[in-house]
Amino acid sequence: MPSFLLEVGTEELPASFVDEALSQWRSRIPKQLSELNLASDSIQFYGTPRRLAIVIGGLPAQQPDQEEEIKGPPAQAAFKDGKPTKAAEGFAQKQGVSIDAFEIRPTEKGEFIFVKKTIKGRAIAEILTELIPQWITQLEGKRFMRWGDGDLRFSRPIRWLVTLLDREVLPLEITSNSIQYKSDRISWGHRVLHPDSISIPNPESYVSALKSAFVEVNPDDRQTLIKQQAEDAAKRVNGVAIIDPDLLREVTNLVEYPSAVVGKFDADFLELPAEVITTEMESHQRYFPVRKSDSSELLPYFITASNGDPKKADIIASGNERVIRARLSDGKFFFDADRKIPLEAYLPKLETVTFQADLGSVRSKVDRIIGIAAQLCTQLNVADRASVEQAALLCKADLVTQMVGEFPELQGVMGQKYAIACGESETVATAIYEHYLPRGAGDDLPQTLAGQIVGISDRLDTLVCIFGLGLIPTGSSDPFALRRAATAIVNITWAANLELDLNQLLEQTVSSFSANYAQVQKLPAADLLKQLKDFFLQRIETLLKDERGIDYDLVNAVLGENDPDYTARALQNLLDVRDRAEFLQAIRTDQRLAAIYETVNRASRLAVQGTLDKQQLDPVPVIRPELFEKNSEEAFFAALQQLNQTMQGQADYTKLVEALSQIAPTVSAFFDGEDSVLVMDSNPDIKQNRLNLLGVLRNHARVLADFGAIVKS
């Protein structure tokens, strides 16, 4: 069975595009081959900075023949007086068959003409010739370019094509005006170590042929090699390489034949904050820092994955040392200059930094953060309000320092360093750093109360203001990362177990926005508040389902399906909605939910037809014993009184489920026993009395969840 190789040779590709392109191929090519009934034994995808390649093994030489059945015109229209009509002749001609091949079959709409056709499978070479240009030109990515005088767009200029079907070149030509790329078996090796062309004999030898030309085409193998080399190099200087996974993947796609090179810098630079040094190395130079083997303290070394000649490692190291020395010198200058004035002295400069055109400067945002933080302190009864307010005041001050101006990713980090340097408390300094946490999915959450409050305040201000301008996220568009902001607020609240009333906080923040930004506000306050509440409820729902693993119906049961009581309750107490969802999941797992489900769910469905207030938990004021006709009603009433006495308005969900389990047999007898009743009695007073019994039971169950939303397991 034939094998196939496609290699697209290019100028140096952006590191991110290599993975993006291979990912697109992985999702498209196997699916496309399957749709064409072209089964293969294996498909391998390869990529380096100068090439994208695919090797397919075990392809059929020819596409299998396919039987196809085609429905034609109604038999009545195809034949008249036993002779074919023009409709029949036209259908036969179109399908390339004779009228003798027609089959008449009955259908729901009468008799119709059918024909069976054999579609001859095409040769694999013919199909691949059609597919390959699509595989290349349909790749998507950022900042594609055109070159020469053609319209072909790609990440970087294409320089060669290799297309081999077994040992033969599959003739192929891609044209872009006067530029023509004709396929061949000629590839190119490493720019430095093997600058000559290389002939690929067949697809199976592709990897080994390129390896002989100092190109490791398998990204995973290259990554493993770089990681091992970096670790070994660090050991040679008695250290441990700090290998960030994202940086490792980026470096993997920057080199074709990696060799680890160790460089050194002046130990005096270790006086800089470690974050400055690692940022210089990782973000700007793509170096791996080195730390001591027994601590997190940095050593004056770095490791770079070179794509040059390993024999010239000393020259490569020397050149990189000059670069990092200059970068660290700049960092030291910024660090020393920034500390000459206290952090608070930078606040006036925030007036020159625009947060958003209609909302003014970052300094204005800081004032809003302070206001929200004060409301949060009141809600949470914070003792050290002064530290929270000072942290809120200084949280954005480092944005206008020279260091953060050069390295924006150090915002918050430098704020913490500079706050300590100018005598601020540890509480304030830590909160300045933590209020940016989490910076992304999987990141740490703020651990201090001040950091949590300032972080929530910052994000809530952004949400209310941007929503207020009518810039609500749609689809995948979310330029202000509002979904991430709302998710962070919920996660911070849950992780820290903050007794936060988000409902009240939203109302206060929206009111303040409307009072101060009425001239730019696009949504009425009531609509703005509703949009924000719905937005948070969506985030809570997603977090409960996707991150906490709560079943969808249990999430609906605690959030309420179009039930304002539940939605308001969820936002008033984020901890309670989390706890109720997790408790429901737990009792579903251990079968306690199943034990009460039928009873409570049946009662809840019937109680909807009554008029009892959903807050009514005491049965005595709403039940008339004189209307009882059966002993089961009396027993139900007594059981409800015991239930109310047991709970006494407590939100003890374990005790509630135990009590509901105990009452279940009594309710079952009310519905189905020898002494059962017809709830919907013809006497309206008796009917309402029985519905009230069910309503009180439903109301107790509602303390936990809307059982009507729960699906039977």
Image: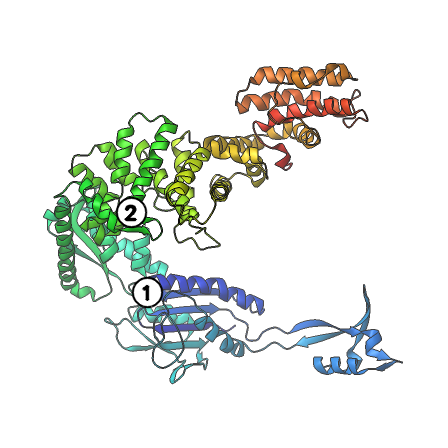
User: Could you tell me the amino acid type at mark 1?
Assistant: Pro
Q: What secondary structure is found at the residue carrying circle 2?
A: helix
Q: Left or right: 712 with respect to 474?
A: right
* In-image side of 108 versus 317 (left or right): right
Observer-nearest residue: 23 or 88? 88
Q: Position of residue 532 (x, y in %)?
A: 47, 43
Check the image and name the residue furthest to the right: 81
Along the line of sight, the residue nearer the viewer: 31 or 359: 359
User: Looking at the rendered structure, which numbered label has been put on residue 444?
Assistant: none
- Residue 308 position within the rendered picture, expressed as x and y whole percent measured from the top left: 22, 66
| Residue 115, picture quadrant | bottom right
Mark found first going from the N terminus, 2 or 1:
1
Q: Image quarter for residue 552?
A: top right
Residue 253, located in which quarter of the rendered image?
Answer: bottom left
Q: Which residue is denoted by mark 2 in the rendering? A: 362
Q: What kind of residue is marked 2?
A: Val
What residue is disc 1 on? 14
In the figure, is residue 299 to the left or right of 205?
left
User: Could you say which is closer to the camera, residue 623 or residue 145?
Assistant: 623
The image shows residue 312 at horizontal and vertical percentages of 16, 65
> Is the residue marked by circle 2 packed among few (<14), some (14-19), or many (20+) residues within 10 Å?
many
